[in-house]
Amino acid sequence: MADLSVNLAGIKSPNPFWVASAPPANTAYQCHRAFEAGWGGVVWKTIGDPIVNVSSRYSSLDIGGNRMVGFNNIELISDRSPETNFREIAECKKRWPNHAVIASLMTDTRENWHDYMKRSVDCGADGVELNFGCPHGMCERGMGSAVGQNPDVIEAIVGWVMEVAEIPVIVKLTPNITDITRPARAAKRAGADAISLINTINSITQVNLDNFCPEPYVQGYSTHGGYCGPAVKPIALNMLQACASDPQVGLPISGIGGIGNWKDAAEFIALGATSVQVCTAIMHYGFRIVEDMIDGLNDYLDKKGMASVNELRGRAVKSVDKWETLNLNYKRIADINYDKCIGCNLCYIACEDGAHQAIDLVDEGGRGLGPGRLPGKKIPQINVEHCVGCNLCSLVCPVENCITMVDVETKKPHMSWKEYQTKLAAGEIERIPAHP
């Protein structure tokens, strides 16, 4: 069994799975339940001047019968007093000395940042996370993403915090920005120990077509909210890799955004995360999902022959490069396993109407019948000459591993777009002909 323990900038936890700063991390009661279930760390719901929330607060994007594929909230930071929150952090840390308990902070003035930082130290927190990401409500008060979108302000505020910091400082970044590396670099310049990303994305998930107001609404009015859940995972992975690969950032990272199972977590770790934070999946299924996450990650690491989760960290970072570096002469095409084909012909329709017309419908021709396929019905066949390897057919196919992508030997040398342009300008090669 692999060693799942991690150390994020001096914050140690028995595994990389942390409860994100959100409703599941609002109280000592929830913290105890999380650690009893197996979570390695808890990032407390953001502490600041107590706010007043509205009703209702949540909305979701549901797709194909799947609930909460995307999750939207207009809830703000903790509505409980700082005194209560810091007291309960101390209680949790005393009861769970080997688990990570991190205080999430949001305030305004230099004096208040100093005060909250000192109180975090006094209550025994293992570290603090500065919330520079909240995209609604708090940003309208000059905090949250209003800070995270301005690298100069990030640098100034992190600098204030570092003046009195005695425990690790994590800066939580907003995704509501063009280039995530700019605020990450600002955090590094100011002396931050780590970064976490992503916070929620500005969104409106749905409109109530009876009252013509977006959900959630408050007496007939709504506002943009913070979007999270499985739907944001691709955006989070992209921003994670950008920071992990940037030499000017060079900070440990806690990954956040759409993580709901061990595979999601493994992908985040492979792209550079040390720990991963989970919110929406807990709100959907409860704290016990961590049991499967721990078992699944352990099994995966064992199969890969990795003795520690730290051996996985960053393994995929260098495989991402600019488009201009990719090999134009590499080719993959689709291949159909007829023993699994059910004859739905979704691949044919998708390719014919939405891609490159590289799948033909042909007679069954003795290929044998897969499960549920009717005798005499025409079946899909890849047109090898026309297939461009776009992957669409394999993505729409409802049967796992029925359509796979296979390498084709082209016997052509490596040729990136950058190399192609250089050789074309030098007259060393002729222009590649356009498709008819």
Image (tube, rainbow, N blue to C red):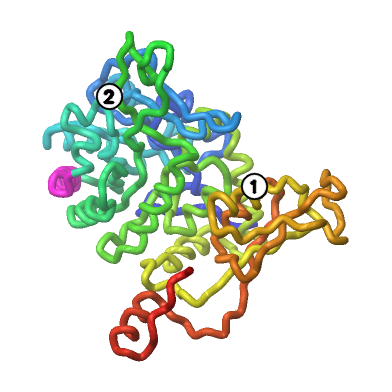
Question: In the visual, does 377 lie left or right of 23?
Answer: right
Question: Is residue 123 shown above or below 399?
Answer: above
Assign the magenta stretch its main secondary structure: helix
In the rendering, at what x and y percent does residue 354 appear?
53, 50
**Element under label 2?**
helix
Asked whether 266 or 388 is in front, the reply is 388
User: Does the rendering let one see residue 327?
Assistant: yes
Residue carrying label 2: 82
Range of residues picked out in magenta: 150-164
N-terminal-most mark, 2 or 1? 2
Which residue is painted at 61% across and 59% down in the image?
A: 301
Dot 2, how many residues are within 10 Å of its Cα: few (below 14), some (14-19), or many (20+)?
A: some
In the rendering, at what x and y percent does residue 165 appear?
22, 45
Question: In the visual, does 429 lie left or right of 135?
Answer: right
Question: Is residue 267 shown above or below 316?
Answer: above
Q: Amino acid at mark 2?
A: Pro
Count how many numbered circles sit on residues in the image. Answer: 2
Which residue is painted at 36% across and 13% down in the image?
A: 55
Which residue is painted at 23% across and 50% down in the image?
A: 183
In the rendering, at what x and y percent does residue 243 appear?
33, 57
**Element under label 1?**
helix
Residue carrying label 1: 295
Dot 1, how many residues are within 10 Å of its Cα: few (below 14), some (14-19), or many (20+)?
A: few
